[in-house]
Structures are given as C-alpha cells and as structure tokens.
Image (tube, coloured by chain):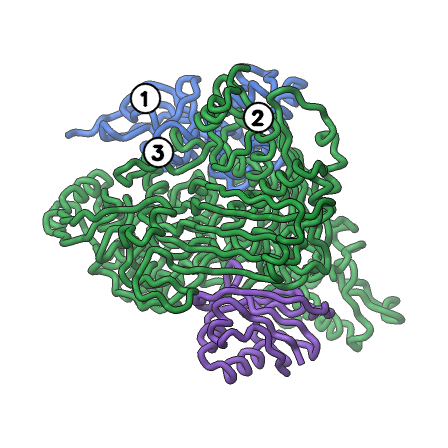
Chain colours: A blue, B purple, C green
Amino acid sequence: MAKHHIQAKVNGDDVEFLCETEETLLDVLRDTLNLTGSKEGCASGDCGACSVMLDGRLVCACLVLGCEVGGRQIETIEGMATGASLHPLQQRFLEAAALQCGICTPGFLVASRALLEKNPSPTETEVRYWLAGNLCRCTGYDKIVTAVLDTAATMRKG
Amino acid sequence: MARVVLVGNLAQITGGVAEIDLSATSVQQLFRQLSERYPALERYLEGGVAVAIDGQIFQDSLLEPIGPDSEVFILPQIAGGRGQVLNYDISSRVGRAQPTQKMS
Amino acid sequence: MAESSGHGATNGQHFVGTRQIRPDGVDKVTGRARFGADVSLPGQLIGRVLRSPHPHARIVSIDTSKAEALPGVKAVITRQDFADQPSEFVPAGEMMMNYKDVVRNVMAREKALYEGHAVAAVAATSTAIARRALRLIDVKYEVLPHVIDVVEAMRPDAPLLHDDLFTAGVEPKPAKPSNVAKRVEIKQGDVEAGFKTADVVIEREFKTAPVHQGYIEPHAALASVSEDGSTELWTTTQGHFIVRAHCARLLGLDIGKVRVTATEIGGGFGGKTVVYLEPLAIALSRKAKRPVKMVMSREEVFKASGPTSGAVVRVKLGATRDGKFVAAAAELKYQAGAFQGSPVQPGVMCAFAPYDIEHVHVVGYDVVSNRPKVAAYRAPGAPISEYAVESVVDEISKKLGIDPIQLRMMNAAREGTKAAYGPKFGPIGLEETLNSIKKTEHWNTPLRKWQGRGVASGFWFNIGGETCVSLTVNEDGTISLMAGTPDIGGLRASLTSVAADELGVPYDKIRPIIGDTGSLGFNFLTGGSRSAFSGSMALVEAAKQIKADLCARACKLWEARPELVEWKDGAVRPLGALAEKVKPMTIADFAKVAGKTGGPIGGVGRINAQGAGPSFGTHLVDLEVDPETGRTTILRYTVAQDAGRALHPAYVEGQFQGGAVQGIGWALNEEYVYGADGKLQNPGFLDYRMPVASDVPMIDTILVEVGNPKHPYGVRGVGETPIVPPLGAIANAMEQATGIRFTELPMSPPKVLKALKDRGLNKA
C-alpha cells in the first residue's frame, strides 16, 4: 500500500514525511525524523516516555498515528530549550538531580511544562497526579516532584 | 598458623573437615596447600571463591597476604568476579580479630 | 588518603561531597543523550525474535525456508547458528550462570522452557517485513506439561525441565534428576540447643512474588560485523566488557575483535547484566553482512528478561525474655526460572546478617520452573529473606513488648560482630541508622485508626572488582576522564568530583566519558554497588601517576632534586630555597609544556578493588489502609542508610529514594501473574503495576556516614541496600494498621480486602 504523505510542524519547523498507516507518531519522530529524544518504554501509553505536545495538548506519541498529524503542530523535548538557554524546568531538573538514568526525563519535562502552562501554582498532589502517567523507576519521584514545584515557584516570581 | 574455615559442600569434599590450620602467607599459597591436602578441592578454589581474611572479604585476589594468626573464611563469591564457580556451601566459626591488610 | 587541593587551581574548593550538576545532564534534559534504541547505522536491518508461545515444549523442528524466501529478509537464525557450550559457570552480573544454559537461554535448543523463550530470529529491511517473516517460520512443538510454582516444582512428580539436573549440595548424590538445582546452607553454633534457651520462639512461612526490575528502557542492541570478522556492538548494558566476553564466547570470536560501546542506559537494577539480544544481533549481522538493530518490546521485556525470584521462606527466631536473639533458622526456596542460578546463596547469607546471633542455620534451595531465567535485581536475594526475618523480628518485639528499634538495637551487628555468614564486620553503621530513625520527628508522630507504622533494617555486602579508568591532561590543562563502567545513576558526576579534588582542577574542566571496550582495560560491570566505590579508588591511582610524573618533570625543569618538590594543593611546589627561585606549577602550567617535557600527561588506574564495606539501612514507613477497598496508601517514608561517605549526596539520596519506592511496589502491587496455561497474564505496565508519582509521598533521607576505612574517601556502595528494608517495614506497618500479619507479597488491594473480610474488619 502506498505510504501517506504528511506535512506538519515539529518544534516550529515545517516537516514532510511518508509513513505507513500503522506507524505511530513516535515511530515517525524517532525513525523518520531522527528526533530520538522521545523514548519508547511501552508502546501502549502507560509509561509517558514519549510525551509530546500535539496542538498544545499533552499526548503519548505512541498512541497517535503518524498519518493523523497532517497540518498539526508537534512539540518535542528537542524544542524545549530556546536559543542558548535551557527551559527553567530543564535547568531545575539538573540542579535538583531529578534524573538518574534519564530515560524518562524527556517525557517528564514535556509533561511538567504542560502542567505549568495550565496551572502555574500546582500543589504537590496536583503535580503527582498530573505526572502519574509518567513512569520513573530510578528516583522514587521525590526529586522530580520537588524540581517541578521549585520551578513553578521560580517562574511565578518571573 | 592461619586458621582456615570452610564448610558446607566444600567440607563435604574434605570429608567433613571444616577447620584447618595452615602456614599459608598468601591466598595463592592457601589454595595450593588446600589443594595438596584435598585434591578434589582444587577446581572449587579455582572456580572463584571469596576469601575473608580477618573480616575483610577479598575476591579474585591471589596475592593477598595472610598473616600468621589470621582467621580465614572461604566463602561463596559475592556478586561478581571473573572466575567460574561451582556449587558449595559456606560456614563459619568464632575466632580472634586481627588487624586487616591495608589497601593501597 | 585524599590530597587536599587547598590553594591550587580550584582556590581551595572541594567537590567531593557537594551537589555538582552532572556532566551528562544537559544531554539528558534536551533529548540528545543516546540510549540503546537511539543509535542507528546506515543500511541497518531490523532484527526480530520469534518466541515460544508454550511454557514448556520440545522443539521437534524449525523450518525457516519460507521466511528466508521472503523479499527483504536478509538473515534467519535458529539454534543451528550457535555451537553448544560445555557446562561452565561464569559470573552473570551478580549471580553465576552456566554457559551451557546461557546459549540455551539466548536461543532455545532442545526445548522451549518458558513462554517467550527465543526460538528463532530474523533480520529484514523493515520492521514490517521482519514481522511477516516471523509468521512464516514453521516451528513444530511437542507441548510438555509445565510447572510454574516453586513448591510444585520441587515435588518428585513435577514436570522436569532438565533431565541432566541433579541436586548439588546433598549427600549422597541423588540418583534421579530434579528441578532442585542445589541446596546451600550456612550454619554456626547449635540452633537446636539455642532454641532451648529461648523464652519466645516465632516461626512463620512467607511467600513473595517474582517482580521485574522494571527499567523503563527496553533492551536494545545494534551489531555490525564486517567480512573479516571485526565486530562492533552498541548496547544498553550494565557491563559492556561482560557483554563482550559473553558474545565472544557464544559466537566463537576473539575478544579483541569485538568492540562494544555502552550506550546511555535507561535503568538496569541488575537486569542488564546478562545478554539477550546481543548475540542474536551479532549472529544476524554476521550472516547478513549488514548492521542489525534489535529492540525488545515491553511485552518481550516482561516475558523474556529479568525478573527476580519469587520465593517461599520459612523463618524461626528465638529470643530471651529481655529481647536477646539466641537462635535463628530459615529455609529458603527460590525460583531460578528456567535455568539454575537464583540468588538464593546471597539470600541465605543476608537473612540474619543485621543481627548478632550465636546460633544460626539457614538452608536454601535453587529451583527451576517454566518461567524466564531470573536476573540480578538490586541486592539479589536479600530483600526476600530479610523481609521474612524483619517480619518475625517485629512479631517478637510485639510479643515481648519491646520497642522495635530498641529490640533491633539490642541485637544489632556492630564492629567486631561475627556475621551470620562467617567473618567479623569492620566498622559498620547499623546502630547509627537505627539511632537516627529513632530521633526523627516522623518516629514520634501520632497515628490514627487504620494507620500503621513499620520499621525494618537491611544489609547488603557490596563488592569491588576489576576496574580501569584513565585521566588524560589535554593541551589546555582540561582533563578527559574515562571510565569503563556504564553510568546508571550519576557515576560521572561522582567520579568527576573525585578527579577534581585529586588533581586540584575545577569540576567543570573535567569531561568524563564511558569508554568502549577497546579504550580501557577490563572492567567488571556496574553492579554490586561497585561503580562509584571502585571507580573512585582507581581514579586515585590514576591521579597518583599524574602527580608523580609532574613532580618528576618539575625536577627536570627546575633542575632540582626530588626532595625539593612536592605535590600539594593542586600544584607541584618548590620547597626550601627553591621556593624563592621558582613558582609552583599547576596542571594547566604543565599542559602548556607537556611536549617539551616528555610528551602527553596522563594516568591509568588499573585495580582489582577490594575492601568494599557493607552498607546497612533502616527504613520507617507510615501507611493507611482503606478498609472498604483494601487499598494501602503510603503516608510518610524515611530512609536512613550508611553511605560511608557520599561522593555526591544528591545521587546517594536518589538511590535511597528510588530503592524505597521499588520496594513499595514489590510490597504492595507488583507480581508476575500466570494463568493455568503457564502464560504470563500481565506483561505490560498497565497490569504490572509499578508505583507512579501519585502512589507515593516524598521519601525523606538521612545520610549516615560511617567511613569505610578501606576506601581512600571512606565510600561504601549505596545502590542496593535501599531495596532491602521496605518489604519488611511495610508488612510491619500493615500489621499495626490492621492487626493482621501479612505473610504473602504483594499486599495488593484484593488480598488485603479478603484478609479484612475474613476477619470481619472491613466495616470501617
């Protein structure tokens, strides 16, 4: 069967690609566009390691088909730092040792940014429930949750 | 003489002897002397055991010195090492503590 | 001892013990870091594995002709492509494995021994073609009766996995094969006599479910074999030197011809210390003469890798009226999976290690059944046996009316205590962890109905082992640091701090990398809580060489005798009258004149690290049970553990916190669920329920530092001990919350609810 020809925007750039019907957005990002920052931990939407923004909404890229994203805007971890500077969440994750192995980190960062855009003053419980779709096996979540709360406080101060 | 303790399956090989006094001054000598006395032990010792000398566990360390009054335990290798290992047990006994060898 | 770097290039700043930003951090928060599945090569093929749908079946025949004929398929491999191996035991991570079994585990030979056992593999130009090809492979199975449960597998009439497996460690040698691979024991004193002196004896049987390491990154490997046999492999592993050794052995290659690069690793916890895909990818690439990339799906990870043993443990502990433990006995039956080699030996040795008990007898059995071969999981074997022991200790404390911390303190192993496994302990910090827990506000906070508080201690040996690191001084005085143990949780940050302090060079002037197998001498793997311990020891050696070299160069430059120069505070300094004539030289000064004074400057530390100090920990947990649903909520958690010396406190805390939460999962939810058909029913993260952020509270940490005298910085391994106490601590808290002693893990909501209903307790 012929492949689908898709045009979309990824991290602000126009992209064009061909994909099979069954290929997921995650397959396209990783294998076709070589954006390997989004990780595949389960391919079933349970681990959140492939979290990306699709038209401003947080999704698991493994649960979206490549051929569904025509004309839409995708933001991945690769687009999170702007220019020379890291996003405050990225910086705080580094300072707070909020990562050990780092495989889940891109997903946590994308999901955390989505949270802070929606809710600049989350409580600890709100952070924990928002991030409940992202699995981390190394940290026990403590330093991740702390980093998100600290970043929110810093960003509120401007 | 260093007091050497081995039991479990290793002691099965020595016919039940679990404690032996040996004049070995290094792990290599210890293994050699044990193997001379109990040839069937040799492959087990070669196979990668841990040796506790005065409370300090050494693994894969043939050249480690053994003091004249040292208390030595032959243990199953703990978490790693490069040798092979066969099935054996371990045991223990009470003894005097000695100053341990200095690490570099 | 560590050189102080007072007034060198770092202006007296020390980095060991501080919370520096990890050098590999920016790559990991920006998506740049390349993990196992992130590396690709031009022209690469995709490899996929055909796996047995049966838990136990004889493989009658495998016909690959149709798959081979499919356009786009470039190679197919089966058992035919691997030579058989003699029976020989080798270290597989933190446990031992037999090459005869390794070759059968990576590719089934006579029989498929568990659902998911690899039977064939293909390499094709696309994933879709590879999948299609798998469907075209015709495997004829003769399905055999299977056995999953450890106790059933031990029965004389159980289906036999291996007809050449005779129980080792029993006299006389058994005449018949069995699923019990070996019997191990430790024994000291006379337990029977000991129990006679006890005023209280508690005996109880416990059961734990097998749990998976649960790393978020699936196994992945990329192999490229050229026509002359040169082999390159990129893989996500805890030990690329071990992978090289295994692959060379299984495929008949010279070790020197195989170059293995460890990619960034997305969690391992012991589960990435063995080979699965690596030999298959090499075999496929060798056949296809193209690079082959293989990545496991999550389902494959659950069915064909890890997990750790499920077990049945019987513990008997006797104490005098005033709380002194006098005798202890235990019997451990550990599942090994399809091949022998469960962590029952360390389970036996660790069971009573935290306590000073005169009479001890522990027996363990290593039992095969139709499950995936177990792999090491964080303090392999210890959480299971220590959970059972800590539960019984708690019962004794209740029975005698002695505070559980006080009771542990009375019996705690301390310097000079003879461990239950033989030798005497050096300086250890168990009492300090108990004391620090007792002093917390947490310990003294009141609880409400349906809430409970539990405490438990834990022990792990820790290891050293072969380690090689290098330090190279670059032309501008910056430093390249190379280690050969994969960095799984901040190793590069810890080692960089050590190198900075040793050389008196600022932290950010040192760039650490993990070298491939061609760049350094042999390194044992990242496991046994050894990589920071051994790596920092080797770095001290490497730095020593550099300092000696620089002192020698200074002597030549200054035309001075050796006794007139010394390395101090990050520079070679002239002494006496010479100090009037010349200025001290830092590493940066020497870097400028390296060529003129003898060439490149560097050091290589090559050691077999000994002197690993055991690490003890004590955990404290508060929880609440919902009597309507049986759900348990962890309210509060505090970890105290002896780190010896924390090179990087934040990553040490991270080990404590992560281990605690893994333990919470093990205690409350995680388990392999098998159907009557012998198939795994929950091979995904939705049904294999690991803790998520909303399941747990903040994990408070107390860093206890009882220095390890055998390490130049006092370091003890810290990574494994934190998973040992949680199971017991949580079970003990459950008992307080419900009045029920749960003896089976996980204490999942259905089980808790049933226990409450059985006792008429579920009406809140």
- Residue at which label 3 appears: C682
Badge 3: chain ID: C
Pointer 3 or 2: first along the chain: 3
- Residue at which label 2 appears: C738
Q: Nearer the viewer, residue C123 or C177?
A: C177
Badge 2: chain ID: C
* CB-based contact (under 8 Å), mark 3 and mark 2: no
Of circles 2 and 1, which is in front? 2
Q: Nearer the viewer, residue B94 or C692?
A: B94
Q: Nearer the viewer, residue C405 or C740?
A: C740
Q: In which quadrant of the rendered view does residue A125 lie?
A: top right
Q: Residue at x 53, y 28 (%)?
A: A82
Q: Position of residue C633 (x, y in %)?
A: 55, 25
* CB-based contact (under 8 Å), mark 2 and mark 1: no
- The circle drawn on residue A69 is 1
Label 3 and label 2 in one chain:
yes
Under circle 2, the secondary element is helix
